[in-house]
Amino acid sequence: MKLVSAVPLDEGQRARLRELVPDLQISDSTSYVSDEIGHLIDADTEILYAFRAPGDLMQRAPGFRWLQMLGAGCEHLAGCDIMRSPAAITTASGIGATPIAEYVLGVMLAHYRWLPQAYRAQMQREWLTQADVARASRELRRRTVGIVGYGSIGREVARLARPFGTHILALKRDPGTRAETGYAVEDTGDPAGGIPEKFYGPDELLTMLPECDVVVLSVPATGETRGLMGPREFEAMKPGSFLVNIARGSVIDEDALMAALKEGPMAGAALDVFEHEPLPKESPLWDFENLVVTPHISGASRAHLRRAFELFMDNLHRFTSDEPLLNLVDKERGY
């Protein structure tokens, strides 16, 4: 059995892999940042551990059996031959819940405690009076946070937000199924789905939005979620509300967002993902003072690869034992 890894594996990791699969052949990249791994893949490759996969993977490796992604999204595989093959695809969904949820709490608190304005004043050497800040800043306590997409990230956002005295609402594909079914890092999230005060289904977004002071988007990028937040949805949002998008840029109609930021009802937003990345310098999004723009960094963490490898080891054990894999992609749904 041959494994190709798009990231370097240290001796300890190699030893653990071979302890589990003694005859495992390992070919790994020498770089953490390069996507060029095609030269490592040959006809004997059965397993790939990578952020991305070549579009012609199945042609390069006709006997290929399993792709373990290093990231949570697999929308880039749409149209690739692996999506039409019997090979399994599993994502790393769940390993980024901690840093992404911390990002969400960070921008929520920054918005309510007026930190972006204070930072801009600092850069201009301007001393804001307490009276100015008191009139503008608010508290997160007793606000309603609506989470659109209640997977591992959404559940960790709920767990971290609840101690601030917030009310949690959640929207998910199947609101009748409360328990988490994907991979989750120990002691994170809401495994039983007991935190939200109310669940909504996909067709109830317009019902949930007016109830929310903060809306967090954490859905996968699919055809169904493209343009999820459009003119009707922004119009339905509560006056003075705040939006956080850590999903994908495609879920937001950026023109509709800019209109809502400029004319209301929204007070502000934080975007970590965009329709086009890097965000073009000429994009008008850069100019909104009530918008926090970050360069797709919410999941960045030194712990990412360590957590990804633990998930990979768990799934490798399952793969070699013919047990159900964690985070198995439904190819029809695209996630």
Image (cartoon, rainbow, N blue to C red):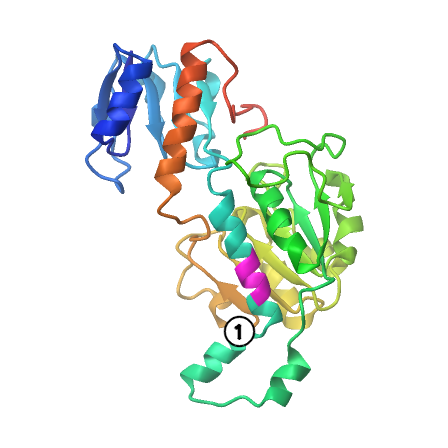
Kindly indicate the quadrant of the structure image that contains residue 314: top left
Question: Is residue 10 shown above or below 299?
Answer: above
What residue appears at the point 54 percent right and 50 percent down from the top-left corner? 101
* Relative to 251, 19 lies left or right: left
Image point (70%, 64%), residue name: 141
Q: Main secondary structure of the magenta part?
A: helix
**Residue 81 in sight in this render:** no
Q: Classify 45 as above or below 97.
A: above
Q: Position of residue 260 (x, y in %)?
A: 66, 65
Residue type at numbered disc 1:
Leu
- The residue nearer to you, when weighing 134 against 57, is 134
Q: Residue at x 47, y 90 (%)?
A: 126
Instruction: Read off the residue under disc 1.
Output: 115
Quarter the C terminus occupies: top right
For the question of whether residue 144 can be seen, the reply is: yes
Q: Residue at x 51, y 24 (%)?
A: 326
Image coordinates for residue 235, horizontal then vertical, percent: 74, 60
Magenta part of the protein: which range? 105-109
